[in-house]
Each structure stands twice: as structure tokens, then as C-alpha cells.
Amino acid sequence: MQVTVTKPEPRRRRRRPKPVDLPRAFSRELKPARLIIHRSTPKAVYQFQTRKTKGPVACESWSELRTYRRFEVDNNVVTFNVQPVTILYELDGYQHEYTPDAAVRYADRREEFVEVKPKRIAETERFKRHEEARRATFEAEGYPYVVLTEDYFAKQPEAKNAEELLYLRPTGAGSHSGLLGDRTHHGSLTSHAR
């Protein structure tokens, strides 16, 4: 007796698009669209104080932390928001939700959405296909979308200079605690990182 097993056709998720206010993503008063730090976080989450956003910045990876530190000391960056908005984009007949890592506003009034990825991930075919669809969605609304890799956040001597500037920046009345306030969260444990 021969048994044939057929896989059911994958269910296509149909979501009603939420109205997204992309210009609001660059506001200093914006709360993240997606929270990074919560009790069920299974991986290390980094957090540091910044003067260019309202309150501390939470990061999901070491790459993001190094990028946000570069933004903090870059005079061309006026402000940046992490996890600013969630958009829907379509790829291969499916709708996908996506939250960029940051929305950055520059001194020359340029605004762009940023994704931070290690080069080994950014060069995969799957990521490139999704990146093209995301870029088309953002550009249809008139905003650039860039992917930053080690070429940006680990470039020397800029990365080392950013670390030194953050370490030496003054703290005191009316300012945040600076680099000394950096924390690494491992589940419910908190340890100081340097």
C-alpha cells in the first residue's frame, strides 16, 4: 500500500496596511515602534545614554551599538531614532512587516532610514531580495534607505575616535551619564560593559 503525502499550500497572510507617518519617524519625541528590551529577550541587549535622542538607546547587536555611538559623536548627525516605524512591503506575493534600525536626520536636512547588518548577512541573496523590496517601499515615499556594514561602524580610525570621544565627554548637571552609563542586559542580569 502506497501512501502519498502532500504538503498543504502555504497560507498567504493578508494584512490590512496600517497608515505609516514616515516624517514622524524623525521626531525627537517618537517612541520606538518595536521594543527591544523586555523580559523574554533571549540574547544580549546593549543600552547607552545619548544626547541626540530622548532617553537611552537600546541596541540588539554589537554592530548597532557601534553604529549608534558613531552617530552620537558625528557632527553631521542632528538626531536619530531607533526602531522608528514599522512598514509593510510586498515580496513574492507575500506582505512582510519591517522595522528599520534607525531614522537619521543630518545637519544638511537629509533624512534616511538605516539598517545595520554584518557584511556576511548583508551579502546573502535572501537579504538582498528583501533589501530591494524595502528600498523600493521607502523610496516610493521619498526617503532613502541604506544598509550599513562593518565598512561604516568598524572603519578605523573613526571607530576608535568615537569610543574615545564618548569616554571623555563631560558629564554633570543637565547632561546624560555618558559612556559610564552603558549597560549590557543578559536576561534579567545587568552588568557594566566597557
Image (cartoon, grey):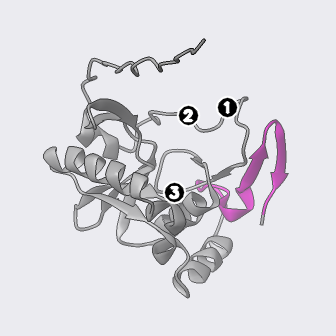
Q: Measured from the top left, where is residue 56 in percent x and y?
A: 59, 47
Q: Residues within 10 Å of mark 1 (few under 14, many from 20)?
A: few
Residue sitting nearer the eye, 99 or 74: 99
- When asked about the image quadrant of residue 77, the answer is bottom left
Q: CA distance from mark 2 to mark 3?
A: 20 Å
Cβ–Cβ below 8 Å for labels 1 and 3?
no
- Residue at x-position 38% and y-position 33%: 97
* Amino acid at the residue labelled 2: Leu
- Residue at x-position 23% and y-position 47%: 138
Residue sitting nearer the eye, 54 or 161: 161
Q: Which residues are magenta?
A: 172-193
Q: Measured from the top left, where is residue 145 in percent x and y?
A: 29, 56
Residue 86: in sight, yes or no? no
Q: CA distance from mark 1 to mark 3?
A: 23 Å
Q: Residues within 10 Å of mark 2 (few under 14, many from 20)?
A: few
Q: Residues within 10 Å of mark 3 (few under 14, many from 20)?
A: some
Which mark is nearer the camera, 2 or 3?
2
Q: Along the horizontal axis of the image, is 50 left or right of 116?
A: right
Cβ–Cβ below 8 Å for labels 2 and 1?
yes
Question: In the structure shown, which secondary structural element does the residue marked by tag 2 occupy?
Answer: loop
Q: Measured from the top left, where is residue 104 in percent x and y?
A: 36, 56
Q: Which residue is mark 3?
A: 51
Q: Which residue is mark 2?
A: 35
170 in relation to 137, above or below? below
Q: Along the horizontal axis of the image, is 20 left or right of 118?
A: left
Cβ–Cβ below 8 Å for labels 2 and 3?
no
